Image: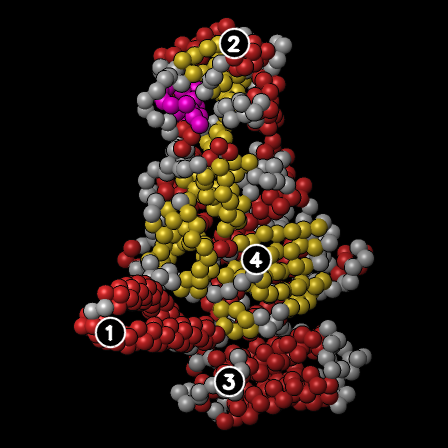
Amino acid sequence: MSIENEDLSGYSMLDLFRMETREQMRVLTEGLLLLEQGAVDAARLESMMRAAHSVKGAAAIVGLEPAVRLAHAMEDVLVAAQEGRAQLDASSVDVLLGAVDLLHQLAEADGAAAPRGNRIAAMAAALGALHGKGNAAPPASPSTVPQPTSVPASPPAPVEPPSAPAGSDELLTLASQARLHAGQLRPWIAGLQRYKRHQRAVYEALDALQDAIRATGDAHLADLAQRVADRAAPLRDTLHRTIEGAEHYERQALTVSTRLADEVLALRMCPFAEGVHGLPRMVRDLARGLGKDVRVEIEGADTLVDRAVLARMEGPLYQLLRNAVDHGMELPAERTAAGKPAHGTIRLEARHRGGMLALAVADDGGGVDPERIRAAAVRRQVAAPAFAAELSQAELMQFLFLPGFSLKESATELSGRGVGLDVVHDAVHGMNGTVRAESTPGAGFTTMITLPLTQSIVRALVVDVAGAACALPIARVEGVRRVAASDVRTLHGRQYVDTPGGGQLGLVAASQVLDLGDAVAGTDLVLVAIGTGRERYGLVVDAVRGEQSLTVQPLEPTFGKLRDIAAAALLDDGTPVLILDVPDMLRSIARLLDDGAALRLGLAADRLAAAGRARRVLVVDDSLTVREMQRKLLAAQGYDVDVALDGADGWNQLRGADYDLVITDIDMPRLDGIGLTERIRRDPRLARLPVMIVSYKDRPEDRARGLEAGADYYLAKGAFHDATLLDAVRDLVGGAHGDRTP
């Protein structure tokens, strides 16, 4: 962090020394890593030499003699390199980086924690040995040269991105409240505009009255009406000026409050590079400890990131880089044999995309074979063989983020790719972000993370649920759809709609998940798609208000963690809104469904008027036993039931009578249940008639075939019992009595 423009009046000389040392050590570290890669020019060497010189002078001012000695020795080495008296190779960089670490410890240490004198003397001697070092000079003895930092087993010391100024959270809250209050002028101005319209109507009536009086020729009344008009005239101008002034004040207040909020947010932001400058050094040391050569390239170094986001992403980024070095990158000989450069490259990228922060960690290592993930998922019993066989590559990559998941195949094998990635997943999801991975075997592995730009302001989709306003972070919303209630189908008691891509989107009522009551939908449904892969649902809400930027207000700690709720906020009109915790909601949905909870909607098409004839059902099955069992069961509940011997018989009956529901088997002579269903869907009069398939065939392909033909419900006879059939019938057509479905 640059301190040139900082107010330094409140800092001690030692504080200033520490701040300067951190900045100069960063310059030295970056320069040494580039020097090791052969990418250092004279200007870079000059800046490194000036950095060592600055630390020497600052250390002298605060009386830190060991730091003066060490910085002076580093300066001598760099001057020798500038003058061509020393050639700095990898072993020289090891020594210089060790000196950087020691200088940092000297600057930050307090009393007894300071490095001992023998360490400083040994490092100064090692630096002195580099002065005249040429290309042919042998490397210094390990016994005399302090070695660089050992391979870290845990995250390095915090990178410490510059913290936001004290009180910035409170300032942001106040700025948000100022903007809210400015916005509340709008209803008042709208009220004045209504008053203006009423006033205009009064003036028009007064004009009409004057015209009527003039027609009578009554001079006294005419004079009286004119005096009333003259006294009322200034009121029109006064109201106009009041409205104009209020609108001008509103614009100014909104502009100032918005600028204030933007400035406070800017105080919380810092360039991406400031929070990750220590990671290239960490990767370099880790790789050297493993006999590998790995370099880090940072793209988007100037991308502005919320300091709080950067601090919380430090651990996940460390884990991704360590995973890439440890499990992704090959040894130099292996890379050369594969036609790659001997050194590996990890690209760390930060960009703003669509109002979000997009991070990517991409390496050019060995990558991951998706088939290994598939086999590991089956071996570790996190996916059944049949289920695993159907998974796409994108779905397979998600297994790497499961706790404890790795690709090792034996107890003696080193842990493989995937170890620790659950930490990344949890941290990203805890910030309302998403993470996914891509890999090309032999070519590399990429992890892509999408996060809100700041944790203080969240871009959210505001919806109504059971009359209450709720907000879902945009990063968690997969899409919004409006579908007709008639497009809803039911399978094994769960409702779904078909998606444009040919898949299915399970429906759940948001009001039921949030314990706000049952949902009764109209002719159209508003769906908010959340989740990914197999855990993707269409959250049915009352209405979508639109997107808003909300200032997050944390809930009081006394409440503890509220299920499905992340935080609170105020809408632009002052309405309080709860920000939903989407990952928590997905867990709640899965738990409720596993417990057998009915998260179904009461569709308007299923809610028929109580008065009217009994619902008429046609049962089509070539088995006498099954046919009669179903007829008696339904008739006992009050349904009017007809039967057909096979598909052809059923088709003939459908063409000559009106039915509310068809229940059909699949395997039947003359015309099977699939063919019957297809004919029903092609017929304009019958196209909307609910069809339920009841069959012994229970394979996924059989169910898919029946639903593709147009069936609304598929029930397996193997899992059949009375209550199951009756529940399914009620889902499709309601109770036994009611008016004809439109």
Disc 4/disc 3 C-alpha distance (Å): 31 Å
Mark 1 or 3 closer to N-term? 3
Q: Kindly identify the residue that appears in the image at 59 percent across and 11 percent down.
A: 648
Instruction: Examine the rendered structure and indicate whether residue 355 appears above or below residue 519.
Output: below
| Label pair 2/1, CB-CB below 8 angstroms | no
- Which one is in front, 722 or 668? 668
Residues in magenta, as a range: 725-742
Q: Kindly identify the residue that appears in the image at 61 percent across and 80 percent down.
A: 27
Mark 2 or 4 closer to N-term? 4
Q: Magenta segment: does it hold 13? A: no
Query: What amino acid is at disc 2?
Result: Ala
Query: What amino acid is at disc 4?
Result: Ile
Disc 1/disc 3 C-alpha distance (Å): 74 Å
Q: Kindly identify the residue that appears in the image at 73 percent across and 88 percent down.
A: 82
Give the x, y percent position of residue 297.
Answer: 67, 68
Q: Secondary structure at mark 1?
A: helix
Say which mark, if any, is on residue 658.
none
Quarter occupied by the C terminus: top left
Query: What amino acid is at disc 1?
Result: Gln
Say which mark, if any, is on residue 226.
1
Disc 1/disc 4 C-alpha distance (Å): 74 Å
Q: Check disc 3 and report the residue beneath it.
A: 3
Disc 2/disc 4 C-alpha distance (Å): 57 Å
Q: Secondary structure at mark 2?
A: strand
Q: Residue furthest top?
A: 624
Foreground disc of the pair 4, 3: 4
Q: Check disc 2 and report the residue beneath it.
A: 644
